[in-house]
Image (cartoon, rainbow, N blue to C red):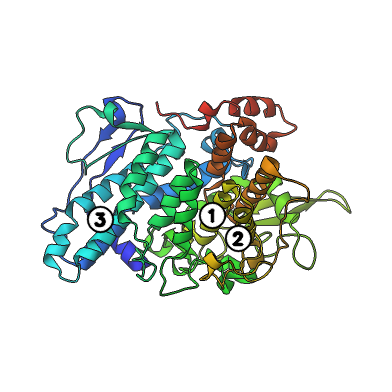
């Protein structure tokens, strides 16, 4: 499939080369430089043309995904800068932003949206010319395209707090762009309404899977979780895990990536389809380099490193047996430790560095970036269950977090198809996290939510999830200190601590500047 993606990059259906500058609600929002177009009549003749179009539509994500990983890590409590960091990284780490910072430019996400609009406007032409592309397949592909467009909008809304809604393929600039700007809340509601018509709940019908694209049931559940509609979040996130019924163990966090195999989720990630849903591939031999290894790696520029809090959290995990520490996700997998010099006979100076995108040490610049996978969906499902508030739902939340349906807990009737599930912590042989006895009510709910968020920080480290997790929980609890305390902690003992903490106590400062 990586070959199809490479082909799509060279023969993108949309070569519109529109460069977007996010500058508020004025007509200067777009600075357009038009390139060439392949006309629809010349393209869209076969199912293969449709597949190439779908891959080409998301090709700009190769450029922006590494930047999103860095923005998430540096804004949150996951990354800290080293002395090698450039001005862009130092500013992001210090919560200082300007429209001149190339890492915070949203143009590639808007390119994806325009590209997908172009494909949507012409996909019916394939059905007219290729009988294998029937009406059912057109409906499924259309849903997939809308899903990937929705993911792009959601990402923009999380970054900026608002988005410019583009309802066509930009053959001309809108007359009044200000009318197209939507708040985060409005765009999420819009996306939910657009996705629902493309959801099917017939569990006997195998889900149509578009390689590299997000699962629209998972995305719909994530959108509901974002607006605190927990019942709908549970419904759709569980359906997402039960997609593709012709492969019953798929997306169930089973033994496929148990213990030492966990790292293979990220080793040529596009083939790890029992775990990964949305993947952006890279291939250095095709001049498609993933720069993360260069920015993160100790042997390269080493501009950023893991925070002490994250390293300590990995090392403090309690396995089912053996010495403390997260053996299968920690040292050597998510981060590494180097002893670089001896200070005295008994004291050494060590440095930590991020290794998640160097697991393939022979070719780290071809490391794929996963933006949606089964563990992420499971933990969101656990989060939603816990927020439902009843004892049974909380039991399900802890089941998904800990040892799964086939160990500590009898298989619940609604999880009859989950016999392979090992649980997030059970998959890597860590002991269960349980609330203390005697805790009840809101205190119990918040405690369980906290341990789910701690697990997300470990399981999904450096996958671009942490900042929004902090924002979502802080907003839900109406508690800015939830976010401010955790992020400012990496500046503890320095003159920056108070300034960073004060800045982050204002929720308006959780979004990147738009002008």
Question: Gap between marks 1 and 3, in whole Å?
Answer: 36 Å
Lateral position of residue 191 relative to residue 483, left or right? left
Q: Which residue is mark 2?
A: 400
**Label 2 CA crowd tier, 10 Å (few <14, some 14–19, many 20+):** many
Lateral position of residue 187 relative to residue 354, left or right? left
Residue 216, horizontal then vertical, whole percent: 38, 55
Residue 253, horizontal then vertical, whole percent: 56, 66
**Label 1 CA crowd tier, 10 Å (few <14, some 14–19, many 20+):** many
What's the mark number on residue 381?
1
Q: Residue at x 61, y 56 (%)?
A: 392
Outermost residue toward the right in this view: 345
Position of 292 relative to 420 (above/below): above
- Is disc 3 placed on a helix, strand or loop? loop
Comparing labels 1 and 3, the label whose residue is closer to the camera: 1
- Is disc 1 placed on a helix, strand or loop? helix
**Label 3 CA crowd tier, 10 Å (few <14, some 14–19, many 20+):** many
Determine the image quadrant of residue 308.
top right
Q: Quadrant of the N terminus?
A: bottom left
- Is disc 2 placed on a helix, strand or loop? helix
Q: Residue at x 14, y 59 (%)?
A: 125
Position of 62 relative to 175 (above/below): below
């Amino acid at each position: 499939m990586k070959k199809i993606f490479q082909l799509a990059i060279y023969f993108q259906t949309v070569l519109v080369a529109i460069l977007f500058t996010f500058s508020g609600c004025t007509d200067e929002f777009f600075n357009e430089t038009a390139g060439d177009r392949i006309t629809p009549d010349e393209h869209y003749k076969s199912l293969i043309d449709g597949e190439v179009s779908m891959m080409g539509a998301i090709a700009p994500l190769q450029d922006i995904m590494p930047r999103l990983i860095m923005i998430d890590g540096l804004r949150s409590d996951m990354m800290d800068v080293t002395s090698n960091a450039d001005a862009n990284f130092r500013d992001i780490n210090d919560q200082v932003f300007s429209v001149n910072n190339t890492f915070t430019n949203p143009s590639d996400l808007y390119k994806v949206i325009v590209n997908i609009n172009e494909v949507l406007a012409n996909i019916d032409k394939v059905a007219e010319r290729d009988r294998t592309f029937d009406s059912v397949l057109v409906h499924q592909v259309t849903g997939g395209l809308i899903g990937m467009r929705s993911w792009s909008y959601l990402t923009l809304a999380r970054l900026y707090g608002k988005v410019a809604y583009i309802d066509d393929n930009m053959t001309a600039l809108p007359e009044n762009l200000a009318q197209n700007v939507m708040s985060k809340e409005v765009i999420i509601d819009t996306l939910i309404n657009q996705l629902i018509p493309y959801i099917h709940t017939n569990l006997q019908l195998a889900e149509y899977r578009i390689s590299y694209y997000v699962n629209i049931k998972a995305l719909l559940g994530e959108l509901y979780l974002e607006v605190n509609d927990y019942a709908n979040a549970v419904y759709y996130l569980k359906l997402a895990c039960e997609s593709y019924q012709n492969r019953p163990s798929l997306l169930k966090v089973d033994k496929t990536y148990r213990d030492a195999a966990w790292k293979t989720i990220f080793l040529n990630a596009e083939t790890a389809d029992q775990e990964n849903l949305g993947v952006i591939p890279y291939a250095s031999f095709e001049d498609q380099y993933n720069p993360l290894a260069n920015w993160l790696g100790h042997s390269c520029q080493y501009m950023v490193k893991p925070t002490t809090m994250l390293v300590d959290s990995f090392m403090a995990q309690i396995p089912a047996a053996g010495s403390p520490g997260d053996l299968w996700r920690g040292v050597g997998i998510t981060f590494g430790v180097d002893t670089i010099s001896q200070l005295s006979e008994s004291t050494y100076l060590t440095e930590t560095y991020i290794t998640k995108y160097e697991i393939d040490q022979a070719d780290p610049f071809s490391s794929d970036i996963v933006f949606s996978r089964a563990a992420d969906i499971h933990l969101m499902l656990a989060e939603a269950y816990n927020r439902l508030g009843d004892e049974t739902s909380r039991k399900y939340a802890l089941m998904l977090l800990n040892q799964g349906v086939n160990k500590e807990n009898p298989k619940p009737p609604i999880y009859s198809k989950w016999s392979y599930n090992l649980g997030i912590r059970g998959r890597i042989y860590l002991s269960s996290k349980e609330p203390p006895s005697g805790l009840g009510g809101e205190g119990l709910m918040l405690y369980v939510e906290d341990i789910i968020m701690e697990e997300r920080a470990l399981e999904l480290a450096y996958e671009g999830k942490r900042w929004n997790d902090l924002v979502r929980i802080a907003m839900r609890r109406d508690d800015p200190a939830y976010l401010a305390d955790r992020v400012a902690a990496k500046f503890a003992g320095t003159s920056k601590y108070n300034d960073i903490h004060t800045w982050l106590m204002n929720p308006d400062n959780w979004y990147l500047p738009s002008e």
